[in-house]
Image (spheres, helix red, strand yellow):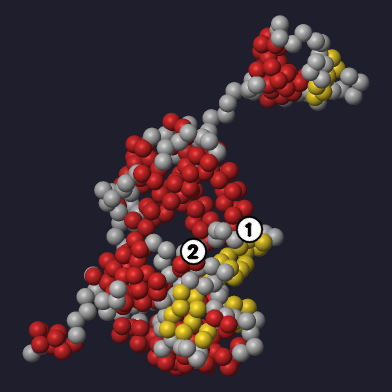
Amino acid sequence: MMSLDSYAINDMRNSLEEQIENKLKGVHNNKICQISDGRYKTHNPQLIKKTKLELLIALYEYYFHQSPLPKRKKSIKTVYPQWLETYKSLIEQGHRSVGSLRHYESDYNRYLHGIELETRDITKITFQDIKKFYAEITANQAITRKSLNNVKTLINQIFDYARDQNIPVINTHDIRTIDLCCKETDNYDKVYSDEERLKVLDACKRQNNVYSRCIGLMFCLCVRIGEIKALKWSDVDFENKRVFIHRSMVQIKENGIYKDKCVDRTKGKKKECNRYESLSALAISFLREQRKETAFCEYVFMTNEHPLQTNMVNKKLKRICEQAGVEYLSSHKIRFWAVTAMYNQNIADSVIQYTAGHSDPATTNHYKRLAKIQPKIESDMWDKMFGM
């Protein structure tokens, strides 16, 4: 017995067939007939299709050069999965990271899934609509500025993809949100102090294992966690006391499994972001100790014949901080310390940008703000001003 849904589908099919046949009257004068294998055919033009509806659609497109089917409304909801597939293919090619994809998927599900804006005709979405959306998700300082910027990046990516598909949409990059108030975070502006750095380094020297040496070296350089994981012995120049930073470890998905892959580029993705960094005596001591364990390995820092995992580095850093009596901040905050320390020493902006491997000077300037809110006063001056 045919279900009610089946009857409804048949009615829609029959109605569409009738509509197209009426359009073709006086245009296509040859018969449409069903052949022995069940398919439908006609001639002049010679066409054979599995169903009568498919044949009628093909004839309509032949004569009128467009589809008789109603155009499906394009929305964020329909464009997002298409953009997602394109992004995944870029990950497989090594142009994007799995970590970023996870953030995008999480932000979409949290902020866009199920709201009215998601299903609206994307070609009719205005600047005011997007600005209103940003205002709603930041209402009462519900999210941080960083979270807002992440959502903006996701929106920009979706709308950029739509434009690439010749869908007429607005340029969402032009929408400013500086006037929106966001949540202040306790941890965002925090950086390891010089004193805390010394305490952590002391704990690293005492532990003297692969993780502590890796963390210790990070406090002697200005590197990202992916760059230190991808460091090879061929990049280390003991004679000239420098290290060449030009690789990074990124996460990819291969055969349904996430794993790290070393790529010959840094996060900046530009050749200008490759750089040499000097090695202090302390940095060399960490490397020489590590050399004893992995002298015949490709990568500097390895455990169980594999490069280190980011989550394990952060776990070990947390444990070292506890032992040193220092508040734990993630490994990325080590890099924050390095850049703010250079600003505090009045090193030229261009040198800091090069050392940090930033492709955009605006990124480097972000750290300058953190340096300004942590003024450095010499202890003797402080005693002179506020001493007994």
Name the spot of residue 8 as percent of width and height, x first: 67, 21
Q: Residues within 10 Å of mark 1 (few under 14, many from 20)?
A: some
Q: Residue at x 23, y 70 (%)?
A: 373
Task: Determine the image quadrant of residue 324.
Answer: bottom left
Q: Which residue is drawn at 42% across and 92% down?
A: 281
Name the spot of residue 286 as percent of width and height, x first: 48, 90
365, above or below 245, in the image: above
201, above or below 148, in the image: below
The residue pinned by badge 2 equals 270
Which amino acid type is shown beneath numbered disc 1?
Glu
Whichever of callouts 1 and 2 sits on the residue coming sooner in the sequence is: 1
Q: Nearer the viewer, residue 342 or 224?
A: 342
Task: Determine the image quadrant of residue 210.
Answer: bottom right
114, above or below 360, in the image: above
Which amino acid type is shown beneath numbered disc 2?
Lys
Considering the numbered disc 1 on the image, is that residue within a helix, a strand or a loop?
helix
Q: Quick check: can you spot residue 209? A: no
The residue pinned by badge 1 equals 92
Which residue sits furthest top?
26
Which is closer to the viewer, label 1 or label 2?
A: 2
